Amino acid sequence: MNKCSWITSLLMCVAAAVVLSGTACPVNPTVPADYTNADSARGGALYDKYWSVTGVTATEPATDHALWASRPDMTTNTRTGADTWRCKECHGWDYKGVSGAYSSGSHKTGIAGIYGLTKTAQEVFDLIKTGHGYGAAGLSDADIWDLTKFVLEGQIDTDTIIDGTGAFTGSAVTGALLYAAGIGGNTACLVCHGIDGKTVPPGADATFDEWVGKLANDNPAEFQHKVRFGHPGSSMPAAAAGTGTTQDVSDVSTYAQALPQS
């Protein structure tokens, strides 16, 4: 038997074995249309505080999340009620959970992050809706698809824009221009926060003290998330909803860290 005939016979045997065993060739799962049409930027806001985004369709939880009682570290993070339902409380503003900024400090739960998750869109949807109980909590399927799209497409590696000291690595000069003109066609930051970042934004109460410079320095990972996805329940625009880039976020955040903190 020559080489070509041998290869042909082998392929025929393999094909026959597949038919007889009933095993089909693996195919890529079809991406659900609901996922394709989902809004990653809105999902990023839901990740922060979902009940401030959905309004009447999902109220603020009064009890602990069902999985809160099974967190690996049961003593460090003593938060209760609604806080335990915020995705960021377990997975972090840097999306890395116990492998990131929440490896220590009062927010530590010992729970893994979601950065680099390799599940399919349907698997993530099912995990959020059923496995984590957000469907029963009042989130609609559309809400959960938005969250799913954020998880799979909206995350960034925060280490690419924040160094080991907590400093943003962008251009403060470019950031100053973006702060004054707006990111990706959005309203300029200074319209609500003032030229020095110390203007109380619309809707905030008299106790507000989360000045732009203060938050940018105190919690850089949270700051980048707020810039990219806005602040739930407010009119703050999301850079990710426009044409803003990760570099834009890095630049404006670098400038923000130079603003007054008090």
Image (cartoon, rainbow, N blue to C red):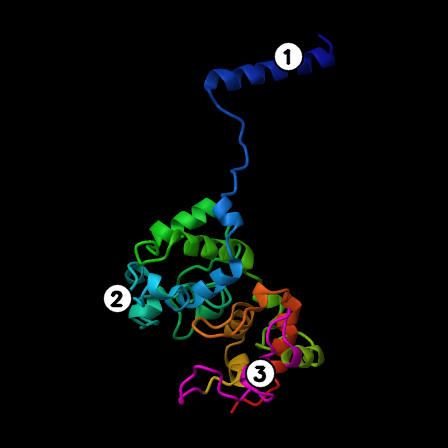
Residue farthest toward the bottom in the current orientation of the protein? 262
Callout 1 amino acid: Ser
Count neighbours of disc 1 (C-alpha within 10 A) and say few if under 14, some if 14 to 19, many if 20 or more. few
Write the start and end of the magenta stretch as one range: 180-208
Count neighbours of disc 2 (C-alpha within 10 A) and say few if under 14, some if 14 to 19, many if 20 or more. few
Q: Give the foreground label among 2 and 3.
A: 3
Determine which residue is flagged by label 3: 191
From mark 2 to mark 3, how far is it between C-alphas?
37 Å
From mark 1 to mark 2, how far is it between C-alphas?
65 Å
Q: Position of residue 96 (x, y in %)?
A: 49, 62
Q: Earlier in the sequence, mark 2 or mark 3?
A: 2
The answer to whether any part of residue 120 appears in the image is: no
Left or right of residue 21, residue 12 in this image: right
**Residue sitting at 60 percent across and 77 percent down?**
253
From mark 1 to mark 3, how far is it between C-alphas?
74 Å
Q: Position of residue 172 (x, y in %)?
A: 68, 80
**Residue sitting at 73 percent across and 10 percent down?**
2
Q: Which quarter shows the N terminus?
A: top right
Callout 3 amino acid: Val
Count neighbours of disc 3 (C-alpha within 10 A) and say few if under 14, some if 14 to 19, many if 20 or more. some
Q: Are marks 2 and 3 in contact (CB under 8 Å)?
A: no
The answer to whether any part of residue 226 appears in the image is: yes
Say which element carries label 1: helix
Q: Give the foreground label among 1 and 2.
A: 2
**Residue sitting at 68 percent across and 13 percent down?**
6
Determine which residue is flagged by label 2: 63
Say which element carries label 2: loop
Q: Are marks 1 and 2 in contact (CB under 8 Å)?
A: no
**Residue sitting at 60 percent across and 65 percent down?**
242
Determine which residue is flagged by label 1: 9
